[in-house]
Image (spheres, rainbow, N blue to C red):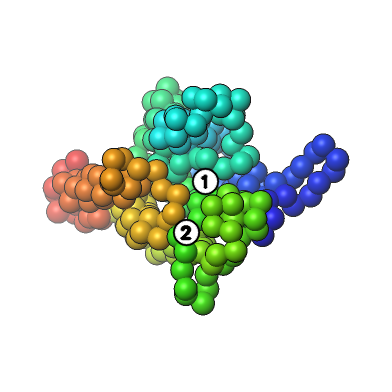
Amino acid sequence: MHPILFDFGPIQIRFYGLMYVIAIIVGSYLIKSEVRKKGIRLTDEGVMNFIIWTVIGGIVGARLYYILFNWGYYGLNPAEIPAIWRGGLAIHGGLLGGIAVAYLYLKRGNIAFWRMSDTVAPAAILGQAFGRFGNFMNGDAHGRPTEMPWGLVFPPESIAGMEFPDIPLHPTMLYEMLINLGIFLLLWFWVRKRDHRDGFIFAAYITLYSIGRFFVEHFRADSLMIAPLKAAQVVSIVAIVIAVAAILKGRLWEAPILLKRSGRPRK
């Protein structure tokens, strides 16, 4: 476990950044494929512009969210604010930032947000899985001490190693990586092949990820806090309630072709 893949003098290639690059490349391929399949009015260039702006919004949102919860440190060390290569990106802030920018971009192009969100959801959760591997190599987003046989001792120079030197920890970044990969496989190979209303895949993504994150957060040692509560668990509960309510209220699971045959209007 080492955060640096290659070191060419002053130039460093870090696993954390590399995982973002891989996520963007793979995600772009998946999204372009789905855009063509769904007949969304976006050229390949338009898709790439959409992805770039959404990723920028996600990174900015993730960083601001993290800084907000750690303002006591960053207020005293403002030079550290741009240092995202050292970790410090909160996924819930990234989702909020990415969704906001994506909505504005699609609204400007008069493109259906919910249909496009369904094309992005599998790529997003796969990208999160890549990101968690970056956290693993970075030694952040770590767990609390454990006596389980799969507990890992992180290098002393890593964030986890400095907080818990020579102590086996829950590899929570790997827990979440595996959960995210499982969600991707479910969405890509099963859910997206079913007939349903626009927005269902996205709502399923939010629901499944939030359930997984709530579980993993129990083992985290570096959680952001809202008073005595873990912020990620609070946000996960809120996200689950909103996503499930959207599925139930909008009956997003119902097949449009069946609605058409029955003469019932689509919402």
Left or right relative to 181: residue 195? left
- Say if residue 97 shows up in the picture: no
Q: As rendered, which of 94 and 26 lies closer to the eye?
A: 94
Task: Indicate the secondary structure of the residue bearing disc 2.
Answer: loop
Residue extending furthest toward the right? 9
Picture residue at 81% right of the left edge, 46% below the top: 7
Q: As rendered, which of 243 and 235 lies closer to the eye?
A: 235
Task: Indicate the secondary structure of the residue bearing disc 1.
Answer: helix
**Residue 239, position in %: x, y?**
28, 46
**Residue 174, position in %: x, y?**
52, 62
Which label is found at residue 143?
2
Residue tagged 1: 31
Q: Is the residue marked by circle 2 packed among few (<14), some (14-19), or many (20+) residues within 10 Å?
A: many
Picture residue at 54% right of the left edge, 67% below the top: 168
Amino acid type, label 1: Ile
Q: Are marks 2 and 1 in contact (CB under 8 Å)?
A: no
Amino acid type, label 2: Gly
Q: As rendered, which of 243 and 74 lies closer to the eye?
A: 74
Q: Quadrant of the N terminus?
A: bottom right
